[in-house]
Image (cartoon, rainbow, N blue to C red):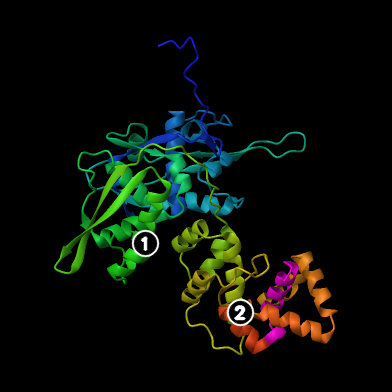
């Protein structure tokens, strides 16, 4: 209908990573219900696969926008590598790590709950990275070519029946379980019953965490799965997406045997952009060195402040390198404790110290990094420390008393045991002084 008075005012769509916030793609319902048969599906893997599906549906056919014309270029979907990274909200310039996730997608075998082409297929087929020749001293653009196995290809281009999923809400989500639950909830949110499938809680554990179904026995009780995985995923979906999810526990006596979810759509609200999660490959590797697995490390990097993670890693490495204190039995458990207490929040900002291979976590390189960071990393902290050391003895003592009152947890114990003999304490003091302490 015509609008001669121009009463209908259409706002341009908000964008995220250069895309409209209403950018959607179709995902076959069987694909949403798929489970991993071989390999392990991480948070970033899920996001990259969804972005690949989005671009394949946008392009419509192979060979479009091919950056080079040769014998095989017409066999791929072509996307600028920078667009793929932005749409997956990767945020890191580490191409090798990103491509390692692409390789992982090629190794993951999936199966669906019904007899469809997804059974016994790999999530992603062959890929190709192509760099254009640069001009005027500039490097050329990098393109990623990808394709799917035949069964997956059919489901990607002609998904029936399907669910519409939003790239925007995928960007808002910060964990693998949250993204997996969002997809499942979105699938059933518009169904007449609003009820998801009912499955044993162990099945939901593997589905949400991306672990291969039945690949290994679960050495975990339901109450811990509920606390550490289920509840955070439900809270995340309900907070940042357009779906509301509620948990239904199906019991046999007092024991929870199966789970089901109710799902419904929220009233449409104005979308508000949030900062994109940044996946830092160096940070992930450092967390893996402490004992976290790949999935846990990725989820933690997406969920927590990178600065706080770096500081906490530096704090636990300093603690582990101190031979005068009782050694840490479980670095992972101790790290979680320090993170929960925000013990490292007041430490000066520092680059991630290199841990070296394996047991070198407790080597001397960490100490050297901590000793130098007050001067080399933060010039203001170095200047503040120099002024402190030039103070008369009585003034230095009074300043240290005020500083000691701000310390808590492990930092307080380290100060009581070592005083300024601890590089970690000297770094904390330098930062505190620079902030006007």
Q: Identify the image quadrant of the C terminus.
A: bottom right
- Give the vertical position of 398 relative to 73 (above or below): below
Tag 2 residue: 411
Residue 217 seen from this side: no
Task: Give the camera-side residue of 202 and 257.
Answer: 257
Task: Give the camera-side residue of 211 and 386.
Answer: 386
Q: Position of residue 416 (x, y in %)?
A: 63, 87
Q: Identify the image quadrant of the N terminus.
A: top left
- Which residue is painted at 74% across and 68% down in the image? 436
Q: Secondary structure at mark 2?
A: helix
Q: Are marks 1 and 2 in contact (CB under 8 Å)?
A: no
Tag 1 residue: 229
Q: What secondary structure is the stretch in magenta mostly built from?
A: helix
Q: Residues within 10 Å of mark 2 (few under 14, many from 20)?
A: many
Residue 424 falls inside the magenta stretch = yes
- Which residue is painted at 55% across and 69% down in the image? 342
Q: Position of residue 400 (x, y in %)?
A: 72, 81
- Whether residue 373 sits left or right of residue 209 in the image: it is right
Task: Give the camera-side residue of 111 and 343.
Answer: 343
- Whether residue 169 sits left or right of residue 202 in the image: it is right
Q: CA distance from mark 1 to mark 2?
A: 30 Å
- Which residue is painted at 27% across and 43% down in the image? 188
Residue 160 seen from this side: yes
Q: Secondary structure at mark 1?
A: helix
Magenta extent: 419-437
Q: Position of residue 367 (x, y in %)?
A: 68, 78
């Amino acid at each position: 209908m015509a609008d001669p008075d121009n009463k209908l005012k259409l706002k341009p769509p908000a964008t995220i990573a250069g895309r409209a916030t209403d950018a959607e793609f179709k995902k076959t319902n069987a694909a949403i219900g798929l489970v991993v048969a071989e390999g392990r599906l991480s948070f970033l893997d899920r996001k990259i696969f969804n972005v690949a599906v989005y671009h394949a549906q946008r392009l419509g056919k192979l060979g479009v926008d091919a950056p080079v014309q040769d014998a095989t270029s017409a066999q791929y979907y072509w996307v600028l590598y920078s667009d793929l990274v932005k749409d997956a909200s990767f945020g890191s310039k580490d191409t090798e790590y990103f491509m390692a996730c692409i390789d992982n997608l090629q190794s993951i075998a999936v199966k669906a709950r019904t007899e469809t082409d997804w059974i016994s297929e790999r999530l992603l087929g062959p890929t190709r990275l192509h760099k254009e020749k640069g001009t005027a001293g500039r490097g050329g653009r990098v393109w990623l070519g990808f394709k799917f196995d035949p069964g997956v290809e059919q489901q990607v281009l002609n998904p029936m029946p399907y669910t519409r999923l939003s790239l925007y809400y995928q960007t808002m989500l910060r964990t693998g379980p949250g993204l997996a639950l969002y997809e499942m909830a979105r699938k059933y949110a518009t169904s007449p019953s609003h009820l998801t499938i009912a499955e044993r809680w162990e099945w939901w554990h593997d589905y949400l965490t991306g672990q291969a179904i039945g690949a290994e026995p679960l050495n975990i009780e339901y109450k811990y799965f509920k606390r550490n995985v289920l509840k955070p995923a439900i809270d995340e979906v309900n907070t940042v997406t357009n779906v509301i999810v509620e948990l239904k526990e199906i019991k046999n006596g007092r024991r929870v045997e199966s789970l089901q979810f109710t799902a419904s759509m929220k009233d449409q609200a104005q979308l508000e952009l949030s900062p994109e999660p940044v996946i830092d490959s160096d940070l992930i590797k450092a967390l893996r060195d402490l004992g976290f697995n790949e999935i846990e490390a990725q989820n933690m990097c997406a969920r927590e402040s990178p600065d706080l993670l770096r500081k906490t890693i530096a704090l636990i490495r300093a603690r582990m390198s101190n031979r005068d204190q009782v050694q840490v039995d479980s670095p992972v458990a101790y790290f979680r404790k320090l993170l929960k207490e925000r013990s490292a929040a007041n430490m000066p900002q520092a680059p991630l110290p290199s841990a070296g291979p394996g047991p070198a976590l407790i080597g001397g390189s960490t100490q050297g990094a901590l000793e130098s960071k007050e001067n080399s990393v933060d010039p203001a902290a170095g200047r503040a420390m120099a002024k402190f050391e030039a103070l008369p003895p009585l003034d230095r003592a009074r300043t240290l008393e005020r500083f000691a009152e701000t310390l808590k947890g492990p930092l307080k114990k380290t100060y009581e045991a070592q005083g300024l003999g601890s590089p970690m304490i000297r770094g904390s003091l330098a930062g505190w002084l620079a902030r006007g302490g």
